[in-house]
Image (tube, helix red, strand yellow):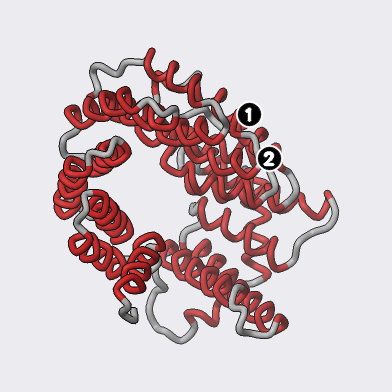
Amino acid sequence: MLTGFAGLSIAVYRTRVDVDALTAGSGVLGPPGREFTAAAERHMEAGLEILNDRTLPAAERLSGYRGELAKAERLLIEGLRAQPTQAYAIARLAAVRWELDPPFTEEAQEPFVGMIRTASAMAPTMPRVQQSLGELLLRMGRPDEGAAYLARTLELDPSLADSVVESMRSGGLTAATMLAALPRQPAVLAALYEPFREAGKLDAYVHAVESTLPVATPTLLGTYTTAAIASGEAEGARKRLRTLEFLTNPNLEAARFRQIGRLDLTLDDLGGALSATRRARSLAPSDPWIADALGDVYLRSERSGEAIREYRAALALVARGSANPRFRAQLYRKIGQAQEAAGRPDDAYEAYRKAVDLDPEESIASRRLDAMHRAAGVAP
């Protein structure tokens, strides 16, 4: 750790002339170190925006990106001068310097490795620091070390699963490697769905998730069911979910029955789907997605009146929460489909129109409106 601090002190000293300009002549003490770090983060984000701006010439994008990183580097050094114990600032400084001047030999990497070890030792329980260090190690071409830091990140904070998995995907790690490296938490397994889907290995994903189902979450039950349907494992998944019980957790029980209903529908077992989804609805009467699912079962069963009732109930539940317009648009589109099935085209038209007003990309509602316009001889 002392070696890391020594290297850092030398780096600060060598850059002292530049960073002094940041506060020279102010006549007041500089801001706290964390404020410098926050400002550096803003410059790093600005640099990424410039780098991703396809309207600019390539040379200008690269120059702008490097310019923002150089500003971030100076601010991080100034922040460390003000507050030397900022582990996150050390981690970000290492990352910035790697981007500005990546070393090409093992010997040249050693100062970066020293900074990583120093920052990690200073903040062993700070997930943001461990994640930043793991991402840097991946960029350095040290995947095993990087994965170990990222695994530690998730042990400290499972809610970071999505961003950690995305970092590992960007670092070129395979779905199987991520599964082996990361803790098998429900949030992690849910985040791994997409890498396994892209790899065409959803059957392996299904089998990996099954051992964790007794401690699942509603999200993981949903991704498990989706993967089972896509990989032809619906029958096995239905049997597996039927053997589970979450009697002390009504929300998990509701999610389990909802997924059983989805699998029943996939297997054309309308009676089973209706029974399971009704059970889910009774366990979670305020869940709009379960009301929506029950509406789907009724619609498939040609019980349009009951489908409309459930879709409207879902809309009422959504109004109490903060669901996005796309979900509301889907509900209106389904109401339109049910109204058409019930022989009420005027009501169907109004529902389709509301769906498109909420989400212009609601393609099914748009097509039905166009078809209705053509049938009536009216221009859309």
Closer to us: 4 or 369: 369
Q: Quadrant of the N terminus?
A: top right
Relative height, residue 337 to residue 262 (above, below): below
Q: Select label 1 or label 2 by which is in front.
A: 2
**What residue is pinned by disc 2?**
174
- Disc 1 to disc 2, C-alpha distance: 10 Å
Q: Residue at x 75, y 48 (%)?
A: 141
Residue indicated by mark 1: 180
Q: Residue 245's spot in the image, x, y percent?
A: 32, 15
Image quadrant for the C terminus?
bottom left
| Residue found at x 72% / y 82% | 59
Answer with left or right where residue 286 lies relative to residue 4: left
Q: Which secondary structure, mark 1?
A: helix
Q: Quadrant of residue 366?
A: bottom left
Q: Dot 2: what SS?
A: loop
Q: Amino acid at mark 1?
A: Ala
**Which sits in the foreground, 126 or 218?**
218
Of mark 1 and mark 2, the one earlier in the sequence is 2
Q: Would residue 225 be found to the left or right of residue 90 on screen?
A: left
Q: Position of residue 44 (x, y in %)?
A: 55, 69
Residue 188 visible within the image: no
At 32% from the left edge and 78% from the top edge, which residue is drawn?
377
Check disc 2 and give the amino acid type. Answer: Thr
Q: Is residue 346 above or below residue 7?
A: below
Could you tell me residue 198's position as x and y percent?
Answer: 63, 45
Task: Residue at 58% x, 53% y: name it.
Answer: 91
Q: Which mark is residue 292?
A: none
